[in-house]
Image: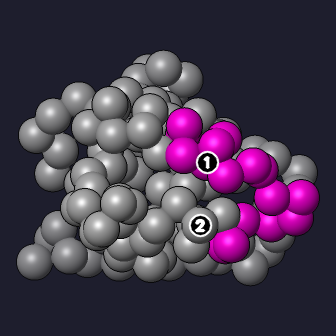
Amino acid sequence: MMNREIKPLTRAELEIMQILWKKGAAFVNDIREEMPEPRPAYNTVSTIVRILEKKGVVGYEAVGKSHRYYPLVGKEEYTQGFMRSVLGNFFDHSPARLVSFFCEREDLSLQEAEQILSIARDTIARKKE
């Protein structure tokens, strides 16, 4: 459960966080190597990592003259906060409206609809216990 407000991350910041969540800790060059081509410049990645540090979602340890960066916020914690924000900003804090939004899309496959129904049934069964 989130105990603090986490500022929303930009697409570039989130791309770097995905790498740090996967690797656990990494130097700027390691992060850069994980990024798709065309890779951003070293200084660009370094700047974004420092912004993430200022936002309080990334920490570092000094290793020689370099820094190894690591996430201070878990992926699950960030996802919960982000989804809470989406629910509030777009769906009036209603998970049912969110699910309805996706279910009413024409490109929702039968398999995906069945998965949603299965998740809902499992949730109902757990709450009744």
Residue 67 is situated, as x and y percent measured from the top left of the image, at 35, 59
Q: Are marks 2 and 1 in contact (CB under 8 Å)?
A: no
State yes or no: residue 88 in magenta.
no
Q: Earlier in the sequence, mark 2 or mark 1?
A: 2
Sort mark 1 into few (<14), some (14-19) or many (20+) by Cα contacts within 10 Å.
many
Whether residue 21 is visible? no
Instruction: Examine the rendered structure and indicate whether residue 82 appears above or below residue 78.
Output: above
Instruction: Examine the rendered structure and indicate whether residue 74 appears above or below residue 26.
Output: above
Q: Secondary structure at mark 1?
A: helix
Residue 40 is situated, as x and y percent measured from the top left of the image, at 77, 50
To which quarter of the image does residue 126 belong?
A: bottom left
Q: Secondary structure at mark 2?
A: helix
> Residue tagged by mark 1?
45
* Magenta region, residue range: 33-48
Which amino acid, by three-letter code, is at mark 2? Asn
To which quarter of the image does residue 117 belong?
A: bottom right
Tell which of 12 and 126 is nearer to you: 12
Which amino acid, by three-letter code, is at mark 1? Val
**What is the C-alpha distance between the residues marked 2 and 1?**
9 Å
Residue 95 is situated, as x and y percent measured from the top left of the image, at 43, 42
Q: Residue at x 26, y 77 (%)?
A: 125
> Residue tagged by mark 2?
29
Tell which of 19 and 105 is nearer to you: 19
Q: Residue at x 32, y 31 (%)?
A: 54
Sort mark 2 into few (<14), some (14-19) or many (20+) by Cα contacts within 10 Å.
few
